[in-house]
Image (tube, rainbow, N blue to C red):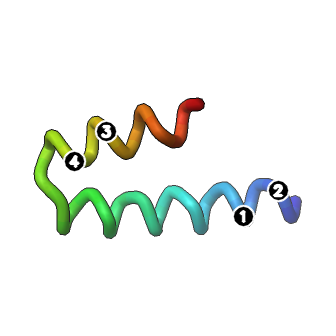
């Protein structure tokens, strides 16, 4: 349950970040997070 809650918080944060950065920056951020 805790892991799911943390995941939800992370997604919400990423969604907010996505709204404030350009698509290119978002792609780079995704690549960084996927490593």
Asked where in the image residue 17 lies, by quadrant, the reply is bottom left
Regarding mark 3 in the picture, which secondary structure is present there?
Answer: helix
Q: Position of residue 13 (x, y in %)?
A: 46, 68
| 4 left or right, relative to 17 | right
Mark 3 vs mark 1, foreground winner is 3
State the residue position of label 1.
Answer: 6
Residue plotted at (18% across, 60% down) = 21
| 22 left or right, relative to 7 | left
Residue plotted at (86% across, 64% down) = 2
Labels 2 & 1 near each other (Cβ < 8 A): yes
Q: Which mark is residue 25?
A: 4
State the residue position of label 2.
Answer: 3
State the residue position of label 3.
Answer: 28
Q: Is residue 35 above or below residue 20?
A: above
Residue plotted at (67% across, 55% down) = 7
Q: Nearer the viewer, residue 17 or 9?
A: 17
């Amino acid at each position: 349950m805790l892991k799911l809650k943390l995941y939800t918080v992370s997604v919400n944060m990423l969604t907010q970040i996505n709204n404030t950065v350009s698509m290119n920056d978002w792609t780079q951020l995704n690549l960084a997070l996927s490593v």
